[in-house]
Image (tube, grey):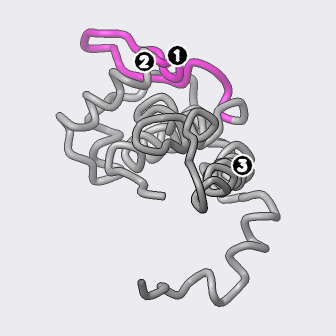
């Protein structure tokens, strides 16, 4: 799976809003999020537009404006964020895995792509923005990352 800069920026921005909302209910300015996460301001503005369209954040313009989460942080998963800014979690040549078909010896490959999507969902739908903001990831994440092999690159 390739995690784009757009997805990374979106998740970090929402985590920053979640952390800020635990301290107050005020709107958070985009420049504050940009500075806190070292994100390019113009890029962040574009990402916030996607998040707003997806209903993950609300905003208000003006000198007292800013952004806040549109729903509780424990109700927003990493998968929600990816879908908001990039689309489906897994695709094959731009199609959903269940819509691709192969002939001959490659026929079982469709099930591999569906299994990949199932595993992506298991992790990405199982971690919320609130958990990341609190630094309290689900136990299964700790179990998966406790494997020393998880930290080593594989050669092609």
Q: Residues within 10 Å of mark 2 (few under 14, many from 20)?
A: some
The residue under label 2 is 52
Query: Foreground mark, 1 or 3?
Result: 3
Q: Which residues are magenta?
A: 54-73
The residue under label 3 is 118
Q: Alpha-carbon distance for marks 1 and 3?
A: 24 Å
Q: Is residue 6 left or right of residue 97?
A: left
**Element marked by disc 2:** helix
Quadrant of the rendered structure where residue 79 is?
A: top right
Quadrant of the rendered structure where residue 112 is?
A: bottom right
Query: Foreground mark, 2 or 3?
Result: 3
Q: Alpha-carbon distance for marks 2 and 3?
A: 27 Å
Q: Alpha-carbon distance for marks 1 and 2?
A: 5 Å
Residue at image position (74%, 51%) is 122
Q: Nearer the viewer, residue 138 or 107?
A: 107
Q: Nearer the viewer, residue 89 or 141?
A: 89
The residue under label 1 is 55
Residue at image position (80%, 64%) is 140
Above or below residue 49? Residue 136 is below
**Element marked by disc 3:** helix
Specify whether residue 55 is in view.
Answer: yes
Of the numbered discs 1 and 3, the one sitting upstream in the chain is: 1
Of the numbered discs 2 and 3, the one sitting upstream in the chain is: 2
């Amino acid at each position: 799976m390739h995690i784009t800069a757009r997805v990374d920026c979106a998740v970090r921005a929402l985590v920053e809003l979640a952390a800020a909302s635990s301290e107050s209910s005020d709107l958070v300015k985009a420049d504050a999020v940009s500075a806190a996460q070292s994100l390019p301001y113009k890029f962040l503005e574009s990402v916030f537009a996607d998040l707003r369209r997806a209903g993950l954040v609300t905003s208000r313009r003006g000198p007292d404006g800013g952004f806040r989460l549109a729903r509780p942080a424990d109700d927003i998963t990493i998968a929600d964020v990816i879908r908001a800014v990039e689309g489906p979690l897994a695709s094959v040549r731009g199609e959903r895995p269940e819509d691709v078909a192969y002939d001959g010896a490659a026929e079982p490959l469709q099930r591999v792509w569906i299994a990949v999507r199932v595993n992506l969902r298991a992790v990405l739908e199982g971690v919320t923005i609130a958990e990341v903001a609190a630094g309290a990831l689900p136990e299964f994440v700790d179990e998966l990352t406790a494997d020393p092999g998880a930290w080593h690159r594989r050669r092609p």
